[in-house]
Amino acid sequence: MTATPIPRGTAPGEPEPAAARFRRLSPRSGFGLIGPRHGRHSVSVDQLAALALPIGDDGVVVGVDAEGRPAVLGLNRPTAYDVVLIGGLWTAQVLALRAAATGARVAVETGRPQAWEQMLHAMGGGQNGLAVYEVGRVPPQGASAGTPVLVVRDCGMRPPRGRVASGPWQAVLTLLPYLSPVAPRLVRQARLVGVQRISPDEAAELGRALALPRADVEALPTLADGFTLWCAARDRQYVMTQPTDAEIGLLGTPRRMD
């Protein structure tokens, strides 16, 4: 019979300490069994610039840019975020659908609830992230990082001041069919402004408010349906919204006029 070796540091006749017994029985104490050995992968400092990770922006895909790359609008933010869209109902509804698909709750404040009925029924009658309210009747939404909210204000040319403002994890999208007398105030307050086809006079006025280059001012009256110029503080981007088959079945094809 082979005698069990006594761990070093243990006198004959003394009980073996538990820690020593564990080290003796475990091949790699605390790390389990030894697995297969692989060669290490390493690169030199000069090769680091060649590495790239395919990580995109987080948000709602509003369409594609001039190079055909996805244009992403980050609506779910820990800070207040106001968006003004001078355009058609179709685009606002597509944005609402896609925001709900990302997990956000969408609260629509509108003076024309019938225009949202089909979309509301398609999404389960308000049980799947979309609710429609009369103007001035939007209750507190309780937005949080786990349940972000998008409030869509479809209140006509002169929307009243909303009871529910933007805040942490709660963005507000105000839809204006045309450039109205309240538009300059809303544009100044907005972090992002989307502009679809407008008249030459409206384009000239908006160009002054947004400090747009002459080329953009001249392009706005010629934009095709589905195209939007999105303007942020230091960035401008033309985006074409391409609907999915499901969106076409529910909302129809892109259109500027409602």
Image (spheres, rainbow, N blue to C red):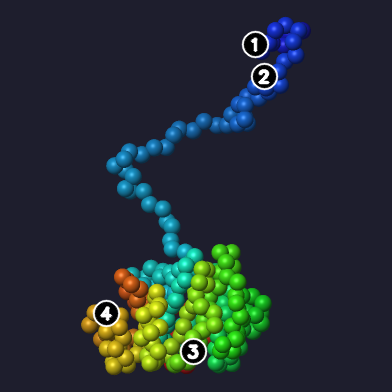
Which residue position holds label 2?
20
Residue 212 falls left or right of residue 22:
left
Of badges 2 and 4, nearer the viewer stands 4
Question: Disc 4 on helix, strand or loop?
Answer: loop
Determine whether 68 is above or below 220 in the image. Answer: above
Which residue position holds label 1?
9
Q: Position of residue 29 (x, y in %)?
A: 62, 26
Of badges 4 and 3, nearer the viewer stands 3
Q: Is residue 237 visible?
A: no
| Three-letter code for the amino acid on which mark 4 is drawn | Ala
Looking at the image, the residue that sits furthest to the left is 214
Of badges 3 and 1, nearer the viewer stands 3
The tag earlier along the polypeptide, 2 or 4, is 2
| Three-letter code for the amino acid on which mark 1 is drawn | Gly
| Three-letter code for the amino acid on which mark 2 is drawn | Ala
Which residue position holds label 3?
160
How busy is the neighbourhood of tag 2: few (under 14 within 10 Å), some, or many (20 plus)?
Answer: some
| Label 4, label 3: how far apart the Cα atoms are | 26 Å
Which residue position holds label 4?
211
Question: Disc 2 on helix, strand or loop?
Answer: helix
How busy is the neighbourhood of tag 4: few (under 14 within 10 Å), some, or many (20 plus)?
Answer: few
| Label 2, label 4: how far apart the Cα atoms are | 76 Å
Determine whether 147 is above or below 214 in the image. Answer: above
* Residue drawn at 57 percent across, 80 percent down: 107
The tag earlier along the polypeptide, 2 or 1, is 1
Question: Disc 3 on helix, strand or loop?
Answer: loop
Q: Position of residue 226 (x, y in %)?
A: 41, 83
**Mark 2 in CB contact with mark 1 (< 8 angstroms):** yes
How busy is the neighbourhood of tag 1: few (under 14 within 10 Å), some, or many (20 plus)?
Answer: few
Which of 173 and 50 lies nearest the eye of the viewer? 173
